[in-house]
Amino acid sequence: MRILIYDNNRQDLEKFCSMINLYPIEIIVDKASDYKDILYFFDNHYYDKIFIDYSDDIGKKLVNKIIEKNPLQKIFLLSDKDDCPLEKNCELCKNKFKKNIIIKPLSQNQLTKIISRKFTCENEFLSTKEFNLEKIKKRVQLEYPYLKFEYCKDRDSFLSDNIPTSALVFVTDLLNQHEIPFQVTHKNQIVIQ
């Protein structure tokens, strides 16, 4: 398997590569942190998967260039914004293109699903609010991996058993940053309003 990674943040790029190195299969990784390098790699090699940090203008230009050259190229867009190259037309994207959005940060579990071809776009049919709530959930799971913490879409609330005060403060700060109204119940359950 051969993959190409674009990320202008060298620390994120190295972390991504170290995650890939954990797999017992041969994976050739070409990595680039600028536009010219990634186009050079793309023009000279076939890639099973391409990962592009979609949070800057270069990432957006790269996606358009790659789609123009090969619309069927499997691309995974790493993003922390509710921003889609096809203006959230999920049906068209699924039927015509092979693009998937990964809400940052990428986890080892997600990478395993991608490599085993069992990953689906995390932005599919999500509203901006739902996208931000997924992003918050992922950040909380990274910060507090021992905490059973789930966003319950039906109840529009975060569920957790015995959430410690530090985790509660962390979550409420993230909700405030994303301007998502909420209320905390007497059982430390966070209800989205």
Image (cartoon, rainbow, N blue to C red):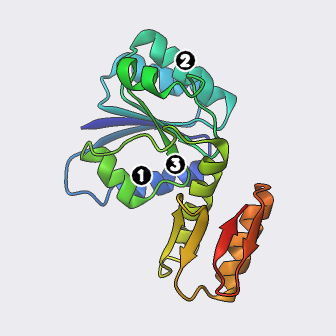
**Does the CB distance between marks 1 and 3 fall below 8 Å?**
yes
Q: What label sits on residue 70 in the rendered view?
A: none
Coordinates of residue 168 in the picture (x, y in percent) = 68, 79
- Residue at image mark 3: 13
The residue under the point 55% across, 42% down is: 126
Q: Which corner quadrant of the image does residue 171 belong to?
A: bottom right
Distance, label 2 to label 1, CA atoms, is 24 Å
Question: Nearer the viewer's eye, disc 3 or disc 2?
Answer: 2
The residue that appears at 58% across and 49% down in the rendered structure is 10
Q: Is residue 125 left or right of residue 98?
A: right
Task: Inspect the image, locate mark 3, and give the three-letter code of the amino acid beneath it.
Answer: Leu
Determine the residue positioned at 57% across, 63% down.
Answer: 155
- Where is residue 51? Give x, y as percent: 45, 37
Relative to the observer, which residue lies in front, 40 or 124?
124
Q: Which residue is mark 2?
A: 64
- Between residues 144 and 9, which one lies in front from this camera angle? 144
The residues bearing labels 3 and 2 have C-alpha atoms spaced at a distance of: 21 Å
Per the image, the residue denoted by label 1 is 17
